[in-house]
């Protein structure tokens, strides 16, 4: 149980376009979802936390207008990278937790974004 | 701020060898500590955790003890298998918060 999927697994887009990444909890309802970014050989950096039905809370230094997060239902959160640039190329990972305050997060397999 | 530092990889061992992956942390309060594992092509999975000093987390033959005096949470396994090949992440969360702070990950390869 507690499976999280991400779609797409890989995406290549041109500079200036927008890309949407979906994160779904397949067999549970996720009150809270998290979006991380991982650079090569570096740790996961939390970008934002979203609770269903409310606005996402962004970490310091993360542009909320560039990385739009929508947590419209208890099983789906989306991250849209707007006006993508090559420096946005990265591995984006989502996770979900069953309840607010729950320690355990269930992670998706990640999405590799390449901006050309 | 809070941070986690773990031993740089990659680490390559032979099957049945003893494994240690070092992890130390900096935190202002009383964090909970975690080890996550990422197998090839999969998402991170919680391997084990400890929520207070001197607690020992264990799972699948792996162990880690929360050492407050040395601010460490080293991962150990007595006899590794090829199937243990993965990337291992040490992480902390502070004072019951959900936010996780990760180390940089250690890639482990076990050769038969």
Image (spheres, coloured by chain):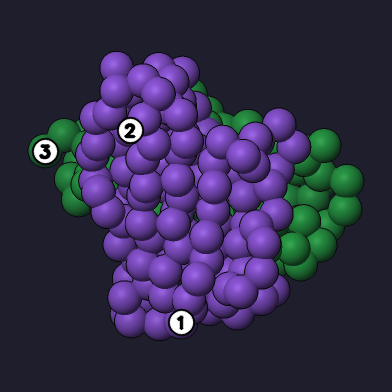
Chain colours: A purple, B green
Q: Position of residue B112 (x, y in %)?
A: 11, 38
Q: CA distance from mark 1 to mark 2?
A: 26 Å
- Residues flagged by tags 3 and 1 on a common chain: no
Q: Position of residue A33 (x, y in %)?
A: 54, 63
Compared to residue A88, the image places residue A38 above or below, namely below
Q: Position of residue B24 (x, y in %)?
A: 67, 37
Label 1, residues with CA under 10 Å away: few <14, some 14-19, many ≥20: some
Q: Would you say B62 lies left or right of A99 here?
A: left
Provide the residue designation for mark 2.
A113
Query: Residue placed at 43% from the left, 27% from the top?
Result: A84
Q: Helix, strand, or loop for circle 1?
A: loop
Residue situated furthest right in the rendering: B28
Q: Position of residue B11 (x, y in %)?
A: 35, 28
Q: Which mark is residue A29?
A: 1
Q: Helix, strand, or loop for circle 3?
A: loop
Q: Quadrant of the C terminus of chain A?
A: top left
Provide the residue designation for mark 3.
B112
Depth order, front residue of B28/B83: B28
């Amino acid at each position: 149980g507690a499976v999280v999927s991400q779609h797409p697994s890989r995406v290549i887009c041109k500079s200036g376009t927008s890309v949407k990444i979906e994160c779904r909890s397949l067999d549970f309802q996720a009150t809270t979802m998290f979006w991380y970014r991982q650079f090569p050989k570096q740790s996961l950096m939390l970008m934002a936390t979203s609770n269903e039905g409310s606005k996402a809370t962004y970490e310091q230094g993360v542009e909320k207008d560039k990385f739009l997060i929508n947590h419209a239902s208890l099983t789906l959160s989306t991250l849209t990278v707007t006006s993508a640039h090559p420096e946005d190329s990265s591995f984006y990972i989502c996770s979900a937790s069953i309840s607010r305050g729950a320690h355990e997060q269930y992670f998706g397999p990640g999405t590799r974004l390449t901006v050309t | 701020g809070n941070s986690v530092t773990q031993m740089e990889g990659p680490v390559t061992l032979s099957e049945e060898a003893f494994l240690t992956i070092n992890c130390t942390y900096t935190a202002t309060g009383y964090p909970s500590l975690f080890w996550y594992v990422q197998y090839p092509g999969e998402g991170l999975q919680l391997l084990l955790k400890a929520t207070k000093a001197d607690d020992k987390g264990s799972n699948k033959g792996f162990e880690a003890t929360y050492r407050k005096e040395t601010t460490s949470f080293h991962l150990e396994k007595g006899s590794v298998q090829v199937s243990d090949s993965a990337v291992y992440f040490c992480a902390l969360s502070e004072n019951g918060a959900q936010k996780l702070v990760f180390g940089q990950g250690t890639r482990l390869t076990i050769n038969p």
